[in-house]
Image (tube, helix red, strand yellow):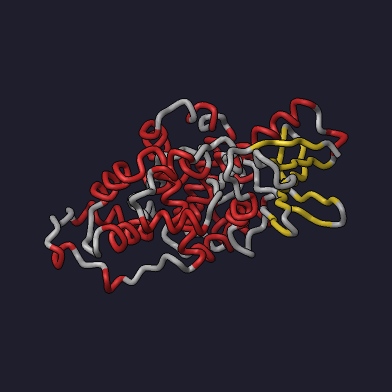
Amino acid sequence: MPELFLDAHAPFDFASTARFLRFTDAEAVDTFAADRYSRAIHFGERLFLLSVEPDGAGAPPRIRVKLSPGKFAAPQILDEAARTVRDMFSLEHDLAGWRARLVRDGVMRRLEADHHGLRLPRWPTLFEALVTSILLQQIATSVAITFRRRVVERYGERLETGGETYLAFPRPEELARASVEELRALGLSNAKATCIIEVARACAAGELSSASLGRDDNEGVIARLSSLRGIGRWTAEWVLMLHFGRPDVFPAADLFLRGVVVKHYNRGVAMTEREIRAFAAKRWGAYQSYSALYFLAGMRAGTITLKPERVLSSKQSGAKPTHRAQRKTTDRQDET
């Protein structure tokens, strides 16, 4: 079985990043057990088992990457696997500048200490990032992951190896051939089903690709993705973070992130999406995505919580009211 060894900037916590990729126990594609992360993934036209694990405690931190079946892992496949793993674990991100910004930020400094070395976990393909983000719109994460599992089980390819069965995230071509009725049968709304099929067709036809979008700046990517049915800024910003690995994004329309900023940085006084966006840019600059990620890590660990009764309304706080239509769009989080 061929092996690759990849270095990361220190600090790097492989296990915490892999657990974010695993996300919940209902996850069907990503597995993490015995300090090893695995997933079935297509390289070229063939399905491989990709396994990643830490390689000792040296400096710089290093991880070991394996592909199975190894007999089909040609040099170009190994190169593609190396690029994919570097991206998925954000190995090339250097957080020294971010940690330097936290000197006067007690909340974030404590979160960074608790989750030291956590990197942006990234979906390996644009299609997977878009479909997962669409599923997450306006519903509980646990429900969205259940829907994702159903989609994977219905349309994903299976890989049998080592006595285990691994499921790959469906390729765009598979969901491009799906019908709205088929996805509705899995529990998806009509709008989500329609949106996912349209995204699948655009990706399968080459009209939407990481290569083309990756050349645009953040606002260009947001504009292109927002032109698709059912996708708005909220979804596009999560894709910028968790697929493209852009470190300077803060999804200010996200209800949880907005609540964290209001509670912990504005004494419970409500802020508009524009105000939160400006605050994040000033406070965390080029590392806004990591602030959002560490807030999520704190939520999962139970150290960051929100109590709605402590967040004042715009009227109570004396803040300038936001236009009703704008607030409705913000609160929907790109609901499809």
Query: Left or right: 289 with respect to 73?
Result: left
Q: Is residue 116 above or below residue 219?
A: below
Please report the residue visible at 41 percent of the width from the left and 60 percent of the height from the top: 138
Q: Is residue 51 above or below residue 43?
A: below
**Can you see residue 176?**
no
Please report the residue visible at 72 percent of the width from the left and 50 percent of the height from the top: 38
In the rendered image, residue 117, in percent from the top left (x then y), is placed at: 56, 49
In the rendered image, residue 315, in percent from the top left (x then y), is placed at: 14, 65
**Can you see residue 121?**
yes
Please report the residue visible at 47 percent of the width from the left and 52 percent of the height from the top: 293
In the rendered image, residue 68, in percent from the top left (x then y), is placed at: 82, 42
Q: Is residue 281 above or below residue 210?
A: below
Who is closer to the viewer here, 51 or 197?
Answer: 51
Who is closer to the viewer here, 141 or 104?
Answer: 104
Please report the residue visible at 72 percent of the width from the left and 35 percent of the height from the top: 43
Query: Left or right: 268 with respect to 117?
Result: left
Q: Quadrant of the N terminus?
A: top right
In the rendered image, residue 178, in percent from the top left (x then y), is placed at: 60, 48
Who is closer to the viewer here, 307 or 168?
Answer: 307
Determine the image quadrant of residue 265. Answer: bottom left
**The residue positioned farthest toward the bottom in the image shown:** 309
Determine the image quadrant of residue 148. Answer: bottom right
Query: Left or right: 267 with respect to 185?
Result: left
Who is closer to the viewer here, 10 or 211?
Answer: 10
Number of labels in the image equals 0
